[in-house]
Image (cartoon, rainbow, N blue to C red):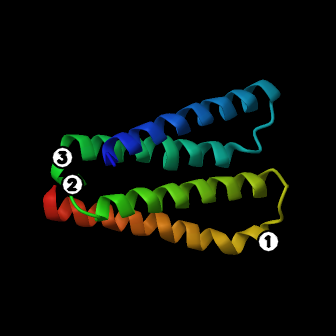
Amino acid sequence: MNISRGFLVMGAVYLVVGIVLGSYMGGSGDHSLAPVHAHINLLGFTLMTVFGIGYRFVPALADGALPRVHFWLHQVGALGLLVGLFLMMSGRVAGEAIGPIFPVLEGAILLGAVLWLVGILRRG
């Protein structure tokens, strides 16, 4: 698996999703999903693109199992968090019902970021 390409492709996917959601909000005048839009752009597009560029420009960062674990932790954590936030903010699921899963998903993203830090300290 090419970690850099994986992050860059997923970042581009989130960019398109963020633009579509932003266009919907702008056209409808309903900005209630603005926190979801912001998280899509930050966790999805921005972070994944930064990770992809980092792995591309410092190839040693992509060596070993840690980058693959980082990739999958971020994918699962970000997707789960963004879907959960959308469901909660749109009123489809009560915050009390979905809220307890957020710390787990945030933990996955945090652990992935720690693995990124470890890679930077070791090989960056």
* Residues tagged 2 and 3 counted as in contact (Cβ below 8 A): yes
Q: Earlier in the sequence, mark 1 or mark 3?
A: 3
* Residues tagged 2 and 1 counted as in contact (Cβ below 8 A): no
The residue drawn where x is 16% and y is 52% is 60
Most distant residue in the front direction: 1
The residue drawn where x is 25% and y is 67% is 118
Gap in angstroms between the C-alphas marked 1 and 3: 42 Å
Residue 3 place in picture, x, y as percent: 33, 48
Most distant residue in the top direction: 27
Q: Is residue 41 left or right of residue 115?
A: right
The residue drawn where x is 58% and y is 49% is 39
Q: Which mark is residue 60?
A: none
- Image height check: is 79 above or below 69? above
Q: Which residue is mark 2?
A: 61
Where's the C terminus, which quadrant?
bottom left
The kind of secondary structure element at disc 2 is: helix
The residue drawn where x is 47% and y is 63% is 109
Q: Amino acid at mark 1?
A: Ala
Q: Is residue 120 left or right of residue 72?
A: left
